[in-house]
Each structure stands twice: as C-alpha cells, then as structure tokens.
Image (cartoon, rainbow, N blue to C red):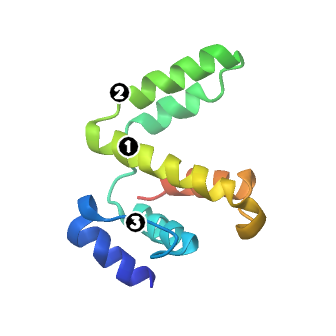
Amino acid sequence: RIEKLKIQFNQNVNEMTLSDENHVTHDVTSTLKQYFRELPVSLLGPWNFQLTEAVQIDDETERLYQIQDLVYELPGTEFHTLKFVIQHLYYVAQQQALNKMGSENLGKFCFISFYFCC
C-alpha cells in the first residue's frame, strides 16, 4: 500500500486527494517518512541550524516570531511541503485516540524526518 501511494505521489501529486476512504493515515505518514529519508538534502536544508537556534529562545513571543520568519523565508516548494506535512500531522493528532500518535511521537517524526533525512 505504501509503495502504491508513493507511485501515485510521484506520478501526479497535484491531482491526488487524500481521504479516509482511499488512504489509511498510517500509510500516508509512512510514505511521508520514507520520502523525507530519501531526500538528498533535508527539507529545511540551510535553515536547520537557524531553526535549532530559534527554538531555543526563552521568550515565547520572540521564539514564535523567529520561527515564523524562518518558515516564510523557505522557497516555495519547501514552504508548501512543510505546510502539507503540518496539516497532515494536525489531522493525525486529532485522531490520537485511534492511532496513539500523541505529540511526543509526532515530535519524533518531525525531528528525525526534517533534520536527519540526508
């Protein structure tokens, strides 16, 4: 199922619709993880170091502004990919009672996928 989904993404991602009827959430998440692991360069590439610094800012307001600025500096493809991933992870988090994917597990997914995918 994951390979089939990956082929669909590669063939025509712009016309794909991810719905509960057609795709299991676990399959979509697994496909995303595999995709990020196979990237030659991290999705956030040169922004990794800056993002690491930004998330360590003590003042919450300043931290959020810095992260927001970094996100809006991303090139179009990276920005839209990150937006899609965040929307998907939000959906997964809403289903926590069914999928056992709490914030800790989702945080591990994001950290590993975005920082160490190369």
Read off the residue under disc 1: 45
Question: Which residue type carries mark 1?
Answer: Gly
Q: 80 and 44: which one is in front?
A: 80
Q: Earlier in the sequence, mark 3 or mark 1?
A: 3
What residue is rendered at 36% in x and 64% in y?
17
For discs 1 and 2, the disc positioned in front in the rendered view = 2
Question: Which residue type carries mark 3?
Answer: Tyr
Residue 66 lies left or right of residue 47; in this view the side is right
What residue is rendered at 37% in x and 48% in y?
81
Which disc number belongs to residue 78?
Answer: none
Q: Position of residue 23 (x, y in %)?
A: 48, 75
Residue 9 lies left or right of residue 65; in this view the side is left
55 in relation to 36, above or below: above
Residue 104 lies left or right of residue 46; in this view the side is right
Read off the residue under disc 2: 73
Q: Quadrant of residue 44?
A: top left
Q: Position of residue 92 (x, y in %)?
A: 62, 58
For discs 3 and 1, the disc positioned in front in the rendered view = 3
Read off the residue under disc 3: 35
Residue 40 in view (yes/no): yes
Q: Quadrant of residue 80?
A: top left
Question: Which residue type carries mark 2?
Answer: Glu
User: CA–CA distance between discs 1 and 2?
Assistant: 12 Å
User: CA–CA distance between discs 2 and 3?
Assistant: 22 Å
Q: Position of residue 25 (x, y in %)?
A: 56, 69
Local packing at callout 3 (Cα closer than 10 Å; few below 14, some 14-19, many 20+) is some
